[in-house]
Amino acid sequence: MPEPSVLASLVSALREGTIDVVDLTAPLSAATPLVQLPSVFGQTAAFELQEISRYDGRGPDWYWNNFRTGEHTGTHFDAPNHWATGKNLADVASVPAGRLVAPAAVLDLTAEAERDPDFLLEVDHVKAWEAEHGPLPDGGWLLLRTGWDARAQSQEEFLNADDNGPHTPGLSPECARWVAEESPVIGLGVETVGTDAGRGHAFEPAFPCHSYLMGNDKYGLTQLQNLALLPATGCVVIAGPLPIVTGSGSPARVLALVER
């Protein structure tokens, strides 16, 4: 008998439960938290459904909706052209499909973020993780677990803002530059509303994760959930943004394959 193919083995493992599919996606609804910019700037639209028909005179046998939202609402994918530094790089429809399936490293900084909501990941934290778990995956994702997904049911708790602005964890400017320019990963995934820390507007450069990652043809995944169910190494992430022509990003269904 011939050896089973890799894909046949994968299907068998999924059926038998030796590989779990973990949904990293936040449900998308009118209650989904949104990024809030100063009022002088344009704002993203909240998610809303507009019913077309529901088994009625508008369509007796079918139910469907129009929907309206921003590209960067809920769990979403940032393409390089989202930021000025990547304005001549790929839109979300041009991201190679092969880059949407990739291994991931999960750094757990929940204790640090619980003590300090303004906690910043530094290069030394990543180096310490690598000393224990091995190098970051070449062509993979760096996922930052902070426990922030527990706040996702409340706009106020999720943004955690005061008169000085939002207070959410993220990367220092130095770490953002290192991830973008020196690390082998293709992108950064976070549980917060955006890839940058809440204080990112005051950093140099402002919003360094966006500035460095997009400018180096890398990607962002935001508002992820269930990172607590992932191992530090060994999982594979499948990111599925809509291929919006000229789009800067898209709400996405993000899944992880985890071998048990």
Image: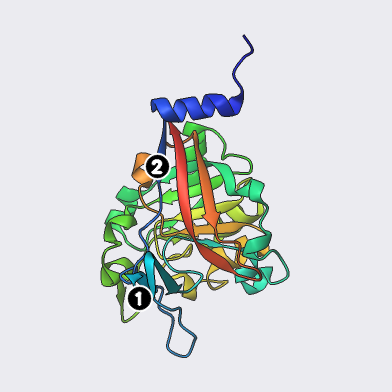
Q: Secondary structure at mark 2?
A: strand
Q: For mark 2, what is the residue?
A: 22
| Alpha carbon distance from label 2 to label 1 | 39 Å
* Model colouring: rainbow
Q: Going by the image, does 80 lie left or right of 148?
A: right
Front residue (pair 36, 174): 36
Residue 204: name its quadrant: bottom right
- Type of residue at label 2? Val
**Depth-wise, is mark 2 or mark 1 nearer the camera?**
1
The answer to which quarter of the image holds residue 6 is top right
| Residue farthest toward the top in the current orientation of the protein | 1
First in residue order: circle 2 vs circle 1? 2
Instruction: Say above or below: 248 vs 21.
Output: below
Q: Secondary structure at mark 1?
A: loop
The residue shown at (48%, 65%) is 196
Q: Is residue 18 visible?
A: no
Q: According to the image, label 1 marks what residue?
A: 57
Task: Answer few, some or many: residues within 10 Å of disc 1's Cα (few below 14, many 20 plus, some between 14 and 19).
Answer: few
Rendered-image quadrant of the C terminus = top left
Q: Residues within 10 Å of mark 2 (few under 14, many from 20)?
A: some
Residue 230, visible in the rendered structure:
yes
Q: Looking at the picture, how far across and down is residue 35, in whole percent?
A: 41, 73
Q: Position of residue 127 (x, y in %)?
A: 52, 42
Residue 9, image x, y percentages:
54, 24
Residue found farthest to the bottom: 40
For residue 108, above or below residue 41: above
Q: Is residue 140 or residue 245 the one in the foreground?
A: 245
Occupied quadrant, residue 86: bottom right
Q: Amino acid at mark 1?
A: Gly
* Image side of residue 124 versus residue 79, left or right: left
| Disc on res. 185 | none
Quadrant in the picture for the N terminus: top right
